[in-house]
Image: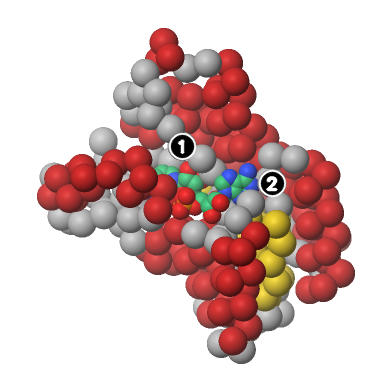
Amino acid sequence: MSLAGRNAVVTGAASGIGLAAARRLAQAGAAVAIWDLNEAGAQAAAAALVEQGNRAIAARVDVSKRSDVDAAAKQAREQLGPITILVNNAGISAFTPFLEITEELWDRIMTVNLKSVLLCTQALLPDMLAAKWGRIVNVSSSSAQTGAASMVHYAASKGGVIAFTKALAQELAATGVTVNNVPPGFVDTPMLREQLKDRVDAIAAASPMKRPGRPEDMAAAIAFLASEEAGYITGHTLSVNGGRYS
Ligand code: NAI
């Protein structure tokens, strides 16, 4: 599988799944723009890729702000060329009992997890339409498939990402641009460790493969959906969960 000559943007790529996806796309030959709120982390990730002989750039971007996204899209286009692969991965999570969800928290989760997908896709889709080729891969969540207690806000935002994926896939089906999503369930990243703390090992022991997913497991699926070979797959939800369906 080669992505040589392709230019990609990966959001939230300073850490976890996004970082692994950026590395995997670069390994397949793509030039990668790493977008993250964490500027130092984004710079370090890009520098490591450049050190290994890849083309990579970094930008501090709040994906929930159109002005940030549009400025970073312009920079990526100028420095790498047209962007035809977009991985909408940046996201935030929280455990909040339903009656304690404030409007502010609801809006924040929706804005970072769902509105960001609109903003980044609108900023980069014109490049893909002009190229008559594009790959949009959205990182959703198994919580949107199975439900998750104390995560109504988060699950609703990620359910929106899955619906967004299916609807845009239909709208773009004849254009050469595919839109798919990968819903992680239980992946060993800083986000998971922060949220589950000392429960990670117990949850891993209860899961079919007796281990959490690795960021690289998600990255492999993301890279496949970004590849030439996945061109007849669109609107799809590719669950990569080690057999953990609830
Ligand atoms: P992580 O916390 O390790 O990485 C997320 C990255 O997104 C961080 O580098 C963070 O700075 C960045 N980010 C957050 N808000 C941002 C914003 N407004 N603008 C730009 N960057 C921003 O988390 P992880 O686990 O790698 O999560 C990646 C995606 O996978 C998220 O969308 C998350 O909801 C999803 N996911 C993860 C699961 C897991 O088990 N780790 C389970 C289900 C979904």
Q: Is residue 74 above or below residue 31?
A: above
In which quarter of the view is residue 213 placed?
bottom left
x, y percent for residue 125 = 78, 52
Q: Nearer the viewer, residue 114 or 84?
A: 114
Image x and y of residue 175, in percent: 76, 53
Q: Going 60% across and 41% down the picture, which residue do you hit?
A: 165
For the residue with label 1, is its CB less than 8 Å from the closest atom of ligand 1? yes
Residue at 48% across, 24% down: 153
Measuring 52% from the left and 16% from the top, which residue is drawn there? 102
The crowding category of the residue bearing disc 2, from other C-alpha atoms within 10 Å (few below 14, some 14 to 19, many at least 20), is many
Q: Is mark 2 within 8 Å of ligand 1?
A: yes
The circle drawn on residue 62 is 2
Residue 18, percent across and down?
Answer: 52, 59
- 147 lies left or right of 10: left
* Residue occupying the point 69% across, 67% down: 58
Q: Name the residue under label 1.
A: 93
User: What residue type is disc 2 on?
Assistant: Asp
Percent of width and height locating residue 112: 61, 37
